[in-house]
Amino acid sequence: MHLRDLDLFCEVAHLGSFSKAAKAHGMSQPAASEIVKSIEEHLGCELLNRSVRPLELTPEGHIYYAGCRQLLDEYRRLEDRVLQRRDKVVGPVRVGAIYSVGLLQMDGYVREFERLYPDAALDLQYLHPEEVLARVVSEEVDLGLMSFPPKRSDLNCIPWQDQPIVVVVPPEHSLAKRDWLKAEELEGENLVGFTADLQMRTETDKWLKQAKVHVNVVHAFDNIENIKRAVEVGSGIALLPVPTVRREAELGSLVAIPLEDVTWFRRLALIHKRTKPFTTAITRFLELLQQDPETFSGPGQSHDAAGSRNRSVTDAASQTKSIAR
């Protein structure tokens, strides 16, 4: 049995699909199906329930999947120790990130990592916060990037950024021409917020309560993109982390206004299992995240805000604190 076959089986189990796993491994769907079938024939039992979509592991499949994952992790750590002697960084770095830490914010880090370590393989997945946590706990990803991470005895938390919260309004809103706002000026406004199951909603409600501000929550979404679109069409205002609205502010489709009398931040952090040792590739990616992407030497890395049509978002962005140093 080859390690690459076990790796393919794990990918099929993880994605719940032969076709998706085959594409990830650069092979045809029939070839991937045949490899898994040969493993099942060798073991004399079915590992996957093929009667449902997505595919599910059988009881025997769960046992085999856990064992294969452990075996592959051990091999990668062994390979990593050998290659360290040659100053070579190889192997996968699997990261699960919440949707709102999107390509605009992560693109510079991804490009610089790929430039510095071409033999490593960075896999960045955008997920719902609960799914980020679940995949970290199950070790399907090495690192999770999320806001306001829970305190758990089985997890380590590495603070990354404190992102200032700004008031986001459409250009035609009565507050749009203001440079700064006081929290009390939000009294009675219609708010487009997050759904109640998200920690960001809990934090927002707490901030408003502490400021003794009452708003009307007119819409609630589980992702920032939908919130921004609702604000753009005039449904209400929003309270969002400044990096998430930088593009819209520069294009002029939204206006971001800093708050002057309160300090509201979205805390972003990386989480990982306490028992999971880091490979050199994972360590290098963590080190890279501690750097300012403006300093990267690769092409297209700079996001110069000069000429922005929304000066307030540029000023507020400068307050973002990198705290993983």
Image (cartoon, rainbow, N blue to C red):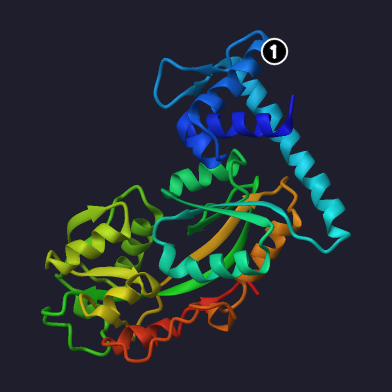
Q: Amino acid at mark 1?
A: His
In the image, residue 121 above or below residue 315? above
Q: How many marks?
A: 1
The quarter holding residue 255 reads bottom left
Judged left or right of residue 24, residue 71 is right
In the image, residue 2 above or below residue 25? above
What residue is rendered at 16% in x and 82% in y? 175
Is disc 1 placed on a helix, strand or loop? helix
Disc 1: which residue: 42
Q: From this viewpoint, is residue 17 visible?
A: no
> Residue lying furthest top in this view?
44
The quarter holding residue 39 reads top right
Q: Nearer the viewer, residue 184 or 154?
A: 154
What residue is rendered at 73% in x and 53% in y? 278
- In the image, residue 204 lies at what x, y percent? 33, 63
Q: Nearer the viewer, residue 134 or 82?
A: 82
Judged left or right of residue 245, residue 294 is right
Judged left or right of residue 109, residue 73 is right
In the image, residue 191 above or below residue 138? below
- In the image, residue 53 lies at what x, y percent? 39, 24
Q: Quadrant of the C terminus?
A: bottom right
In the image, residue 25 above or below residue 43? below
- In the image, residue 1 lies at what x, y percent? 74, 24
